[in-house]
Amino acid sequence: MALLKNCDWNTQEKDITDINEWKKKFSVIHELNVSPDGEKISAIVQGDDSRLTPCVNGVPWSQTFEKAWSLRYGSDGRLTCLVMNDDEWTVATDDALWDDTYDYVWNLQENRDGGILVANIKRGPHYGLAVDGTSWENGFQEARDLAVSPDGKHVAASVQTERLNEADTVRFLEGVWTVAVDGNIWDRLFTNVWGVTFNEDGTKVAAEVRTDIRAYTVAVNGKPWDTVFKSVWEPLFNPANDDVVVPVQADKGWTLALNGNVIWEKRFNQVWYQRYSADCQGIAAVVSPRFGTWTIAVNGAPWKKTFSDAVLAPVFSPDGSRVAAIVKDRGTWTIAVDGQPWDETFDMIWDPHFSPDGQRIAAKAEKDGQFFIVMDGKAAKGPFEACWDPVFSPDGEKILVRSIEGGIYRRQVCAI
């Protein structure tokens, strides 16, 4: 989670609401969600009439629905979910509904900078995207996934341009898939399209594509690379210069390619989840040096320590000098930092968060059914009945803890 803006870092402790009282009022309480600043906790609840609605700090919205799901807070603090009445779906934000309704709506997302909401939609026979309640004019046979530019001004999806008859493999291989950007399709069609993503200023879109049954590559604004590979994974733009880096399967294994040219000499059993450092000088990725082992490679050099079960996407420190990742080894989870796992292991652990100076790491963890805030490998706060990801203050001297103890949802600002 990014550093919070307009957050109260002075109030040390505040009891927000008693979840035990919620249980007396509502027959069903679904998953609890908390706002980024910790001031609100919400859940979709069901009353005696079996209708659903979001509840915020114990107060339900005025509107109720036959169905409601995918409740979440945006980075700007707005509460949003998908709702249905009379078999029509739409998006609700802070108790206000989009004007348009749909046969179905899903995959609700926001742009990186916050404030813009986008979702996949189906209306009649056609699929598309809706941005803050405004739907694409053009509809498609399919519209899968979605990508949003960082500023929210542009959206894209992989789309199927025409309907295929059953078993029409010839037409399928000729290509009926492409990318639609703001509802307008690329000139080039492909056999398959996945992993759509924008560059930093929203002027370019890249996607992994299959140009024929055996040829995989990346297309940027509809133009595929000249080089093809046995397979590729999702591309990533360099925020500094619009270079595109992507895991590729070459002749002797998996590696990374930049603009179609292999840049890591070493080959791996698998490569994915590549990430740039903030200064764009470093790139890290999850790699499998050999079957059944996982680790992180930084600028092509793998950590010496490997893990048997899983390694999740790498996280760079703000200055790019350190890398952390969630790892699972022999059935237990922990965080590894620069190749060294924490001594303590957990039943589950969530994303590592670096302090602004990159010297401290905090994460949410679960052990024996209880939840903790872990700091640099040691349980620092807890146990709790529930808690959410920790957040460092801008000066790095405090941490925001959002937790439930004895049924009380509490917001705490703790010195570290």
Image (cartoon, grey):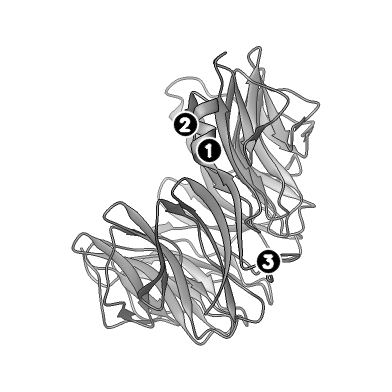
Identify residue for label 3: 4
| Mark closer to the chain start, 3 or 1 | 3
Whether pointer 3 and pointer 1 mark residues with C-beta atoms closer than 8 Å, the reply is: no
- Left or right, 55 with respect to 264, comes to right
Q: Viewer-nearest of labels 3 and 1? A: 3
Distance from label 3 to label 1 (Cα)? 49 Å
Above or below: residue 132 compared with residue 272:
above
Residue under label 2: 170
11 or 181: nearer the viewer: 11
Amino acid type of the residue that numbered disc 3 sits on in the rendered structure? Leu
Residue 226 in the image: x percent, y percent? 56, 64
What residue is disc 1 on? Answer: 174
Earlier-in-chain disc, 2 versus 3: 3
Rendering coords of residue 29 (x, y %): 50, 32
Residue 124 on image: x %, y %: 67, 17
Label 1 vs label 2: CA separation?
A: 6 Å
Secondary structure at badge 2 equals helix
Disc 3 element: loop
> Pointer 1 and pointer 2: residues touching (CB < 8 Å)?
yes
Asked if marks 2 and 3 touch (Cβ < 8 Å), the reply is no
The N terminus sits in image quarter: bottom right
Q: Which structural element holds mark 1? A: helix
Q: Amino acid at mark 2?
A: Val
Mark 2–mark 3 Cα distance, whole angstroms, equals 52 Å
Q: Quadrant of residue 118?
A: top right
Identify the amino acid type marked 1. Answer: Glu
Q: Nearer the viewer, residue 296 or 64?
A: 64
